[in-house]
């Protein structure tokens, strides 16, 4: 939301029209665009939206907090980080220090 608001507030000096901003998203990005269409916080900061291959109603678009936590813990375990839900600060600290390539390479196994 902050990025869209920044564009809206600052596009004119770049030759853009703050009343003619288009959001575009593909796959998960389309879900984000759809959620902006639904959110009252996003009103009046963009004029059009393009969504490609994604929707906020897709079964994979939104998961529960619990499922999100479980996926994060499975990823932590896959990259040899602590994965105790009672010590999330240690889990997060370890994940932050991991090579991003290791996280990407192990992400699909957590689904």
Image: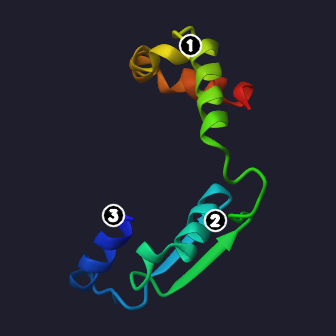
Q: Is residue 53 left or right of residue 74?
A: right
Between circles 1 and 2, the one closer to the viewer is 1
> In terms of sequence position, does the residue under pointer 3 or pointer 2 come before the other?
3
Q: Is residue 50 left or right of residue 15?
A: right
Of residue 31 and residue 99, the one placed in the foreground of this image is: 31
Counting other residues with Cα less than 10 Å from the Cα at mark 3, is it few (<14), some (14-19), or many (20 or more)?
A: few
Q: Residue at x 52, y 9 (%)?
A: 82
Q: Which residue is label 1 attached to?
A: 83
Of residue 1 and residue 105, the one placed in the foreground of this image is: 1
Q: Return the residue found at the far front.
A: 86
Q: Residue at x 44, y 82 (%)?
A: 43
Label 1 to label 2: alpha-carbon separation = 31 Å
Image coordinates for residue 46, horizontal then vertical, percent:
44, 82
In the structure shown, which secondary structural element does the residue marked by tag 2 occupy?
Answer: helix
Label 3 to label 1: alpha-carbon separation = 32 Å
Q: Is residue 77 left or right of residue 81?
A: right
Q: Is residue 78 left or right of residue 15?
A: right
Q: Quadrant of residue 104?
A: top right
Image coordinates for residue 2, horizontal then vertical, percent:
33, 64
Q: Which residue is label 3 attached to?
A: 2
Label 3 to label 2: alpha-carbon separation = 18 Å
Please state, as top left, top right, bottom left or bottom right, where the C terminus lies in the image: top right
Q: Determine whether 4 is above or below 91 in the image.
A: below
Q: Which residue is label 2 attached to?
A: 30
Q: Return the residue found at the far right.
A: 59
Q: Residue at x 54, y 25 (%)?
A: 101
């Amino acid at each position: 939301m902050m990025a869209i608001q920044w564009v809206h507030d600052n596009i004119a000096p770049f030759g853009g029209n703050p009343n003619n901003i288009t959001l575009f998203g593909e796959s998960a990005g389309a879900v984000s665009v759809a959620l902006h269409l639904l959110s009252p916080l996003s009103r009046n900061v963009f004029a059009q939206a393009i969504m490609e291959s994604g929707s906020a109603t897709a079964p994979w678009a939104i998961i529960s907090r619990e499922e999100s936590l479980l996926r994060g813990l499975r990823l932590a375990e896959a990259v040899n980080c602590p994965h105790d839900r009672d010590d999330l600060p240690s889990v997060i600290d370890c994940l932050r220090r991991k090579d991003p390539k290791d996280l990407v390479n192990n992400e699909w196994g957590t689904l």
